[in-house]
Amino acid sequence: MNELIYHYTSADTFLSIVKGKSLWATDASKLNDPNEYTLGISILKEAITDYNKNDFMSSIKDKGLRRFESVVEDFLGRSTDTLQSSLSEGPLSNSFICSFSNDGGDSLSQWRSYADDGAGFAIGINRDTLINIKDSKIFDVSYSKKELVKNVYSSLRLMVLNMNSGYSIKYPLDDVKWRSSRELEILAYSFKDVFYQSEKEVRLVNFSKPSEMSYRITNYGIAPYIEIDITDSIHEVVLGPKCKNSETEIKSLLENLGLAEVHVRRSAGDYR
C-alpha cells in the first residue's frame, strides 16, 4: 500500500497547486522555525568534535584524514558564516524545502497552523513518487538529539572509510567533498526541536540551481521557491473542518483538471 503524506495549505494555494500540478519548495531561510537549521548545525559541530576524539580517528591514514577535515571545516565554516548574517546573501547551497506530515491528513494543530485555521485543504501525496525527484532528498524529521548524533556518527564514519578506500579514484576529490558536504547539510535539515514533534514532519529538500528559482510573498518576506512536479503524485484531498466548499464541488474541480481519480473527503472534525 502506498504511503500518503499530507501537505496542509490555504484555499488559494491549494487551487494553485492542483491547477499547476506542482508544489512550491521554499528557500530554507524562510522556515517557520527560524532556529532549526542553526540548531542542527550546532549539534553537528558538537558531534564532529566528539567524533574527532574517538580512537577510530587515530587509525585513519594522514591523507584520508586531511580530506575528511577539509570537508567538515569547509562545510561548517561556510554554514556558520552564512547563517550568522541571517542568510542575507541567499539560501545556503540553494536549499529549498517542502514540508509534509504523516499524520493521516486530519490534525487539528496542522489545520490551525498551515491551512488557514481549518478553512484550507490537506493534499495527500504518494511518498514513493517523490523519491526520485532530481537533486532532492526526502526523509522523516527527527526530534531527538540522540538520534541525530547517531546519524552524524554513521555518516562521518562512512565518509572517512570511503575516502580511505579509494572512493576518490572513482570520483574526483572535489566531487567527493561535494557529496559529503551535501550529506552533512541534509542531516542538519533533518532535525527540529521537540516542540514541533506533533507535526510528524516529512521533509523534501531540493538543491536547485539559481536559474530555476521564482519568488513569492510569504510571512517571512519575499522568498525564492522552485516548483516540484506532482502530476502523478496526488491521491487524496482532505477538506478542512472550516472549508466552505463541499466534497462534490472539489471533486468536480479535480475532474475538470484531469484529476478525476483523486479521492476527496472532509475532515472528521468540526469547529468554528
Image: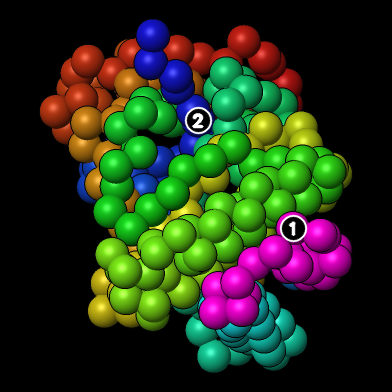
What is the CA distance from the residue labelled 2 to the residue labelled 1?
Answer: 42 Å
Instruction: Single out the mark in the foreground, 2 or 1.
Output: 1
Task: State yes or no: residue 101 in magenta.
Answer: no
- Give the left or right position of residue 31, taking residue 209 as reference: right
- Verify CB contact (< 8 Å) between mark 2 and mark 1: no
Where is 242 relative to 161, above or below? Answer: above
Q: Residue 9 carries which label?
A: none
Where is 108 relative to 181, above or below? Answer: above
Dominant SS in magenta: helix
Give the structural element (helix, strand or loop) at label 1. helix
Give the amino acid at mark 1.
Answer: Phe
Look at mark 1 in the image and give the residue it sits on.
56
Which portion, as a residue range, is magenta? 40-65
Identify which residue is drawn at 28% across, 54% down: 134
Q: Is residue 191 visible?
A: no
- Which quadrant would residue 123 be assigned to in this image? top left
Q: Residue 6 carries which label?
A: 2
Residue 33 location, x and y as percent?
Answer: 73, 59
- Give the left or right position of residue 10, taking residue 246 as reference: right
Front-most of 195 and 182? 182
Residue 14 location, x and y as percent?
Answer: 40, 41
Where is 115 relative to 242, above or below? Answer: below
- Which quadrant would residue 40 be assigned to in this image? bottom right
